[in-house]
Each structure stands twice: as C-alpha cells, then as structure tokens.
Image: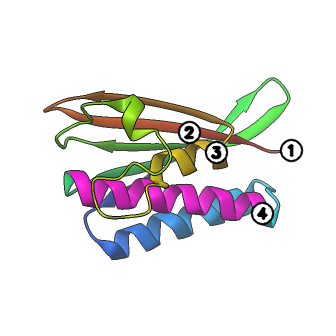
Amino acid sequence: MDEIIIKIRNEWDIVAARQEGRQLAKELGFGEVDQARIATSISELARNIILYAGEGEIILQTIQNNTKEGIKVRAIDHGPGIKDITLALSDGYTTSNGLGSGLPGVKRLMDEFSIASKVGEGTIVETRKWKR
C-alpha cells in the first residue's frame, strides 16, 4: 500500500492525522479499542511535532509480516532533536508543562516502538500495531 502522508503544522492537522489513522485501522479490521489506541498514539506524536519542532509529518502505512497485518505510524520532524531519549521516555517527564505521558504513552499503546533523534537535526518515531 502507498503511504498516507499528513503534514503537521497546526491543531487541525493533528485532527486530520488522527482521523486518517483511525479510518485506516478500521479498514484493516482493527477492533474499536485498537482503533482508539492507534488514533491516540497518532495524536500524541503529532502534538509533539507541533510543540517541539513546529512542523513535520505523520506517515501511515499498512504492513504485513508473515500472517500478521498491521499499521505502521512514523512521525518525522526536523526540529531541535531530543538530547536525552531515555529521559524523554520516562513516565512523568515533560518539558512542556504537560502530563508527561506522550512518548511513554505511545510506547505502551502500540506493539512496537523505536525512536531516533539527533540534536539539531530532528526526530523520527516509528510505531507498529498488529491486528490480533
């Protein structure tokens, strides 16, 4: 499947990315709970893009692995990067006066999670959710 690319520049783009992700998850046959998990993860990732980088993109893609089917979500920005990824993945840690559940929450909601960040160059977060 081709990728669905949603440019993230403002709050409306967060809503659009969330809706696209939920719709794709529904089309793939995910249950309502997993649809909500995917949509919530997309919202958190898109919100982080706006808060920390100003703009970026969410990329959605269907994936297959042997007999499993799923959805891959990538969040890409060219912002300041993350100085301490371990700290950023700690529950309760925040630099934006939020609840500190963003990246750790996404990691819990999805089946697979990876992050790559370089200070001064940006961040790529990739997550996967497999259909049960």
Identify the residue position indicated by label 3 in the image.
108
Q: Looking at numbered disc 2 in the image, what kind of residue is underneath it?
A: Thr
Residue 70: x and y in percent read 71, 41
Point out the residue furthest to the front here: 92
- First in residue order: circle 3 vs circle 1: 3
Identify the residue position indicated by label 4 in the image.
33
Instruction: Report if residue 99 is visible in the image.
Output: yes
Residue 14: quadrant of the picture: bottom left
Q: Looking at numbered disc 4 in the image, what kind of residue is underneath it?
A: Val
Q: Would residue 87 be found to the left or right of residue 24 on screen? A: left
Q: Label 3's element?
A: helix
Identify the residue position indicated by label 2 in the image.
127
Q: Label 4's element?
A: helix
The residue under the point 49% across, 36% down is: 126
Question: How far apart are the alpha carbons under marks 1 and 4?
Answer: 11 Å
Q: Label 2's element?
A: strand
Q: Looking at numbered disc 1 in the image, what kind of residue is underneath it?
A: Arg
- First in residue order: circle 2 vs circle 3: 3
Q: Would residue 18 be found to the left or right of residue 27 on screen? A: left
Q: Looking at numbered disc 3 in the image, what kind of residue is underneath it?
A: Arg
Q: Which residues are magenta?
A: 33-52
* Nearer-the-camera pick, 12 or 79: 79
- First in residue order: circle 4 vs circle 3: 4
